[in-house]
Image (cartoon, rainbow, N blue to C red):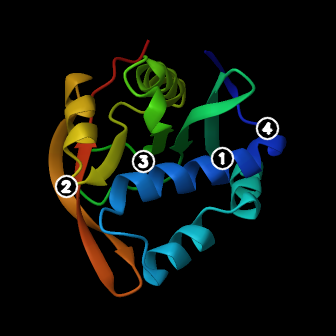
Amino acid sequence: MQLRPATLSDAPGLAALSIEVWLGTYIKDGVTPFFASYALDAFTAERFTKVLQDPGEHILVSERGQGIDGFVRITQNKPAPVPGCSDIEISTLYVQPRHHGHGTGLALLDAGLRICATLGAKSPWLTTNSENAQALGFYRAQGFETIGQTHFRIEDQAYLNDVLTRKLTLS
């Protein structure tokens, strides 16, 4: 496994990996047109190209073999939905399910936290679906604590998310 900053040529891979992880994590009863439309609109190479060109966005990818198997995205100037956090969000941490348990997520999270510290974030934050026990357990094991809740919205639908943060020691 190798970590490196994402490049514009990674945009299609980031989009495909995002669709794979998002659908696999959150869609339990079959892919409906509602969720398919969301995923195909939200996770496109064009959107990732724009993110990669934004100086307030930082994406690191994990490579295994000939392609990426995970990534972490850090977003600057993103106020948390609850008080007590920096304005730096760990906005995405996705690892292909077949690579879970091999240290990829931990390596990406550690590298993402180093970016947060470099940017001066004393308490970066993230959200995850309140029913995603696997992700919540992972983050808590890494020193994150739940400090509130918010909702992830798709059109008129709202899904409860936990807001987590971790205090960082800045050097």
Residue type pointed to by label 3 = Asp
Residue type pointed to by label 4 = Thr
Residue on which disc 3 sits: 87
> Which residue does the image show at 72% across and 35% down from the upper left?
6
Secondary structure beneath disc 3? loop
Residue at the far right in the pictured view:
9
Residue 166 visible in the picture: no
The Cα atoms of the two marked residues, 2 and 4, are separated by: 32 Å
For label 1, the crowd category at 10 Å Cα-Cα, with few meaning under 14, some 14 to 19 and many 20 or more, is many
Residue type pointed to by label 2 = Ser
List x then y, in percent, for residue 2. Answer: 65, 16
Please indicate whether residue 9 sits to the left or right of residue 103 in the image: right
Question: What label does residue 7 carry, if any?
Answer: 4
Name the mark nearer the viewer: 1 or 4: 1
Residue type pointed to by label 1 = Leu
The Cα atoms of the two marked residues, 3 and 4, are separated by: 24 Å
Q: Quadrant of residue 151?
A: bottom left
Secondary structure beneath disc 1? helix
Residue 2 visible in the picture: yes
> Which residue does the image show at 75% across and 26% down from the upper left?
66
